[in-house]
Image (cartoon, rainbow, N blue to C red):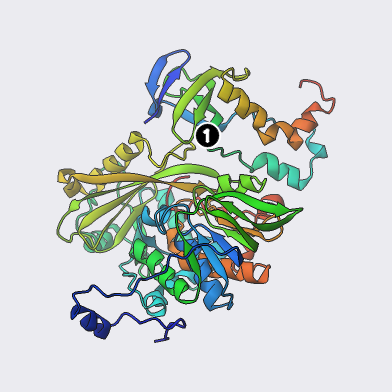
Amino acid sequence: MRALRGGSSRYSIFALARNALSYHENWQKAWRSPEPKPEYDVIIVGGGGHGLATAYYLASVHGIKNIAVVEKGWIGGGNTGRNTTIIRSNYLWDESAGIYEHALKLWEGMSQELNFNVMFSQRGVLTLAHSEHELKEMRRRVEAIRLNGIDSEVMSPAQIKQLVPIIDTNPGIRYPVMGGFIQRRGGTARHDAVAWGYARAADDLGVDIIQNCEVTDILRDGGKVIGIATNRGTIKAKKVGVVTAGHSGVVASMAGLNLPIDSRPLQALVSEPIKPCIDTVVMSNAVHMYISQSDKGELVFGAGVDAYNSYSQRGSLPTVEGLLAAAVELYPIVSRLRVLRTWGGIVDTCPDASPIISKTPVDGLYFNCGWGTGGFKATPGSGHVFADLIAKDEPNAIAAPFSLKRFETGYLIDEHGAAGVAH
Amino acid sequence: MLQITCPWCGPRDDNEFHYGGEAHILRPLTPENLSDGEWAEYLFLKQNAKGPFLERWSHSAGCRQWFNVVRNTATDEIIEIYPMGALPKSAEGIKAYEGNWRRQSAAEKNAKAGVSGT
């Protein structure tokens, strides 16, 4: 196991025992709360998982030490804390396979690398087919995925019933289970822990994490970035990376840019906690519903995006109703459960359902956005390649296809089929 | 949930409606003059406003008529509903219409460049 470079004490069984003797009152703070300095080499706007990962890799891989992450609320308080924590890399196109598999490999070593338990659980992600057509498309996708060296296999309804006993595989239901495919290396992780783990590791490497600091303007001189204006004063920097999912359009307009993005609410809900009844993740594109069980026992349900643009962080009831109708039909036991809470996050939906990791027409201004409904799974890979882009000012082979230029060249990466949720 | 007042049928829940995205997007009338960048601007770039936003809705499960709406996307408040082909009359709607970058876009300039029917 690699030691953290900053040198603060590591989490271990001995640290646990030592701190138990002082009633757990003397644990060190996981990260500092510094005042913003007047100038940094790089400013990352957005303290979610992607932004904190970017700062961590800028410091750990590229050796840049003078970095600030500015966050308008608290770290991990946006979409990082609102998603349904699902991780997979079973995408159709080579470009997507490149970035999502890069991320999945980083997930597999993340708890060790950060010395922070992100509770990554490779419980498998199963996607259902509800029609002949969907099943055929799925077979094609499985072959494409396997050609990229990623695990994936088609399952019959009988195999699905064995893996997920609570599912109704009766062919008479409205959207019968015709088959499915599973990525066994997929799974879930503790979303808050991802933000906290990256924050602690980045802070350890000298990154200033500045919370309650809202960006009000992107300062430019000619066609070049010179810093940002915030509610805590002006901060100078030659490079600014923007990772503000949901509000990318708002921040882009501060720099006079328009992005190919519509911001939409995406909803999720959890049931009351029950005994373990499902030990995998099951997605279903046709009925826009997916389900998993959290470690606390709650069933976690994800819905599709709402049909209209909104920044209200709440969605409409018909979307929840559609999700629950599908859930009750596929998993009859959930009809007796109470819904504990529902919520919405605002996601950046792109015309081709693929992200944007790109330089912009403004020199020194970089955007990482457009992850739509599936950004959480990409957190480490996204941060890793975005840090690379910011440090070198040129995209690497993984990030290059996701540039803004693709909307001009027409080289779109159309992943509506594999995005999992209707856009 | 939104409650939208269809100009023909009265107030109904939003699941009776179909969303048509941003309103007043002008199709380039001389497409042969457009560069790849200008095409990308017309096809893909979005206003995506936080605040008053001009958009189109269709009462697809009712009278099936299209109409325009001024809605505040930060609060989901519906400010004004007005017919297709008309311009907004509310102060917020007029401000949103005039402040929209598409009013100065390549498509708009192209349309004004002496082409009939504008």
Residue A33 placed where, x, y %? 43, 65
Residue drawn where x is 19% and y is 78% of the image:
A20
Location of residue A402 with respect to A394 vertically, above or below: above
Q: Going by the image, does A166 lie left or right of B56?
A: left
Q: How many labels does the image show?
A: 1
- Which quadrant is home to the C terminus of chain B? top right
Quick one: SS at disc 1?
loop
Q: Going by the image, does A63 lie left or right of B113?
A: left
Residue drawn where x is 34% and y is 34% of the image:
A318
Residue A262 placed where, x, y %? 54, 42
- Which quadrant is home to the N terminus of chain B? top left
Q: Going by the image, does B109 lie left or right of A317?
A: right
Chain of the residue where label 1 is placed in the rendered structure: B
**Residue at label 1?**
B51
Q: Is residue A97 shown to the viewer in this render?
A: no
Residue drawn where x is 51% and y is 19% of the image:
B81
Residue A104 placed where, x, y %? 44, 70
Residue drawn where x is 47% and y is 72% of the image:
A202
Residue B19 placed where, x, y %? 49, 31
Q: Is residue A230 shown to the viewer in this render?
A: yes
Give the residue type at disc 1.
Gly
